[in-house]
Amino acid sequence: MFAKCCGATTVGVDGQIIDVEVDVASGLPSFEMVGLPEAMVKEAKERVRTAVKNSGFKIMPQKVTINLAPATLRKDSTGLDLPIAVALLAAYGILSPKSIQDCLFAGELSLEGQVRGIPGILPMAIRAKELGFKAFFVARENANEALLVNELTVFTVDSIKDLADYLNGVTEWVPAISEALDTNYQAELTEDFADVQGQFLAKRGLEIAAAGGHNILLVGSPGAGKTMLARRLNSILPEMTTEEALEVTKIYSISGLLKKHSGLITKRPFRSPHHTTSAAAMIGGGSIPHPGEVSLSHNGVLFLDELPEFGKQALEALRQPLEDGMVSIARINASLTFPSRFILCCSMNPCPCGYYNDPEKQCDCSLSAIKRYNRKISGPLLDRIDIHIRVPRVTFKELTAKEQAEPSAVIRERVVSARQRQLMRLKKHGIYCNAQMNHALIQSFCVLSTSAKMLLEQAFKSMHLSARSYDRIIKVARTIADLAGTENIESAHIAEAIQLRNDRDYEG
Ligand SMILES: Nc1ncnc2c1ncn2[C@@H]1O[C@H](COP(=O)(O)OP(=O)(O)O)[C@@H](O)[C@H]1O
Ligand SMILES: [Mg+2]
Ligand SMILES: [Zn+2]
């Protein structure tokens, strides 16, 4: 007999429906699977066969052929176990074909026939809703995630035995409802700019970075507070829109990083990978493609602390995602893309010992050592960082000052209104912050006053700026003007933008 049902996998950040067809014919007993299965799906064959047997179903050894369609698509989800088992039971007449029509199944099977959760449920559920599936059957630990999609009927399956009883009408079943979400899960972000004394220039730089979505580099001696400052960048970014939250949650779902009771991720990601991170881990990939750090920081911040410690390849790999806002990962017969729009925030010492240009402590590095140290970071990468800031150590007087520093919430209000100005201007061009403007948009939206133009011309000549720096200075100046609430870019805005850019003395 022949039977089919629907399962799902993910391609990039989207769910993809897989038709699972099973044919049982008389002939020499065999169990074949076709349709380009990955190693994992081949293992599924063993798991499904054992799980069905151990669940007490009697299936006679016959010639069994399983086909996964579309055949051209690589399928690498263990979540196809459940639909394969369902189609198999239907082909043996244990389930009626009608009962599984318009239903979607996703779950991994244990050898005993229990159903386990899998990554990627959210994108699958979104697809199920779009295509109008009647019900989505998932493991208990995946139920909350599937229920993030409104008006989708979700059933939790503990074992294939339970599922068969339900589909055959032996037991009554009610659709799953969302369990109480753990609201503490995302409340861990307590770092606030109010804790940072002094450092007005660095804070101003971070405010501008947040307001325009600009990448930023903090350079300073050890203990100056670079890490402390960077960790507070998220606290002044605007809230994510529902759309942004869904994008982020999908990426975490695919990576298997979504906690059981987390619900939709509403806080912007802040990723701080260790400097031993490989290029592959940075941009993603692998035989089962996983989003890398650049995608896990999508809509948030990627913080590279102690930048020169990172491997050259890992840093070079950042160039494409930084430029395009997404990464393409080549696969054998397809290429996948994951979104990767983040603010890159980096910190570094100015030299190997850390005290080059320090007002109090003597640097004992040779000039060539300083050069070698800074050469670790390539020009093209530095060029993609709009804001370069020097972070001096705070003075004792600043550190022990009585008055509290400005809290993040106040800074965030300014950031939010600057972003609103940008949105009004840029929305129709499909972007939402100044950092994303291309040359043409810069031309049309960045009107410089006469004195601003003159100042920029002067700086351009005396500082030997590249064409890329020119665009970047104007973009940062646009953000500064947006923070000030003015439509034209004045010379003061240009002057500040140049100051945030030229701080290259650490290059030795
Ligand atoms: N401006 C500051 N206000 C309050 N504490 C500070 C300040 N700067 C540094 N600190 C203290 O010094 C510690 C070290 O700072 P850190 O961010 O690790 O420095 P860096 O990363 O530049 O080496 C911080 O954890 C904090 O306790
Ligand atoms: Mg540090
Ligand atoms: Zn030094």
Image (cartoon, helix red, strand yellow):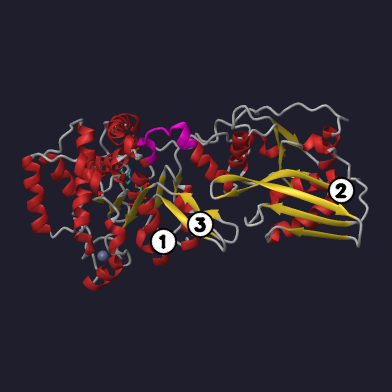
Q: What's the distance in space between the residues labelled 1 and 3, CA to CA?
A: 10 Å
Mark drawn on residue 284 = 3
Please rate how many residues cluster around mark 3, counting C-alpha atoms within 10 Å: few if below 14, some from 14 to 19, many from 20: many
Residue type at mark 3: give it.
Answer: Gly
Residue found 63% across the figure and 35% down from its top: 146
On whether ligand 2 comes within 8 Å of the CB at mark 3, the answer is no
Residue 120 placed where, x, y %?
61, 45
Q: Which label's residue is closer to the chain start, 1 or 3? A: 3
Residue 438 placed where, x, y %?
27, 48
Q: Nearer the viewer, residue 452 or 215?
A: 452
Which quadrant holds the C terminus?
Answer: bottom left
Q: Kindly identify which residue carries mark 1.
A: 317
Q: Nearer the viewer, residue 24 or 425?
A: 24
Would residue 240 be counted in the magenta stretch? Answer: yes
Task: Give the foreground label among 3 and 2.
Answer: 2
Q: What's the distance in space between the residues labelled 3 and 2, CA to CA?
A: 42 Å
Query: What residue range appears in magenta?
Result: 234-245
Q: Is residue 395 visible?
A: no
Q: Nearer the viewer, residue 158 or 193?
A: 158
Residue type at mark 2: give it.
Answer: Met
Residue type at mark 1: give it.
Answer: Ala
Would residue 418 be counted in the magenta stretch? Answer: no
349 up-or-down from 483: above or below: below
Task: Give the foreground label among 1 and 2.
Answer: 2
Secondary structure under the numbered disc 1 in the rendered image: loop
Q: Kindly identify which residue carries mark 2.
A: 1
Give left or right: position of 42 versus 422. Answer: right
Q: Which label's residue is closer to the chain start, 1 or 2? A: 2
Give left or right: position of 343 versus 4. Answer: left
Q: Is residue 142 visible?
A: yes
Give left or right: position of 466 versus 323. Answer: left
